[in-house]
Amino acid sequence: MNGPWEWAASIGTVIAASLIAFDMGRRATAWGFVLFCVVSALWIWIGYTEDAMPLAAMNGVLLLINGWGVWQYWFHPKNRAEG
């Protein structure tokens, strides 16, 4: 488990966490959640193909949590009215 997909998912995870943690504004945070969703889906695929079910299960839960973040920052009616 040290191939290019794992490196891409790892780097994407670090970038997504940075976008959220650096608090550079709502748009950057929203894109951080979107990137988290993408890399969570990638980690799920890696977990299934590498027989690493705990990794896939953890990222399934994280995908739901980050999907909620996408909803909150991009689609929630109270936030759409502010933008």
Image (tube, grey):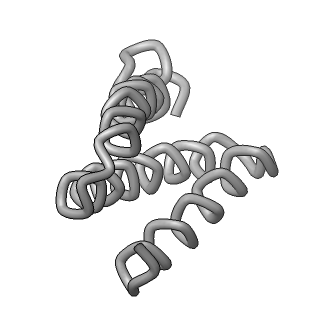
Front residue of 54 and 83: 54
Q: Which quadrant holds residue 68?
A: top left
Asked if residue 73 is positioned above or below residue 38 in the image, the reply reads: above
Q: Which quadrant holds residue 51?
A: bottom left
The picture places residue 25, in percent across and down from the top left corner, at 71, 45
Asked if residue 59 is positioned above or below residue 9 in the image, the reply reads: above
Q: Residue at x 61, y 45 (%)?
A: 29
| 74 to the left or right of 52 | right
Asked if residue 6 is positioned above or below residue 53 in the image, the reply reads: below
Residue lying farthest to the front in this orientation = 51
Asked if residue 45 is positioned above or below residue 76 in the image, the reply reads: below
The picture places residue 23, in percent across and down from the top left corner, at 78, 44
Residue lying farthest to the top in this orientation = 78
The image shows a total of numbered marks equal to 0
| 18 to the left or right of 5 | right
The picture places residue 44, in percent across and down from the top left corner, at 28, 49
Q: Which quadrant holds residue 16?
A: bottom right
Residue lying farthest to the right in this orientation = 22
Q: Residue at x 49, y 78 (%)?
A: 7
The picture places residue 2, in percent across and down from the top left corner, at 46, 80
Q: Residue at x 64, y 62 (%)?
A: 14
Quadrant of the frame with the N terminus: bottom left
Q: Residue at x 26, y 62 (%)?
A: 50
Front residue of 76 and 65: 65
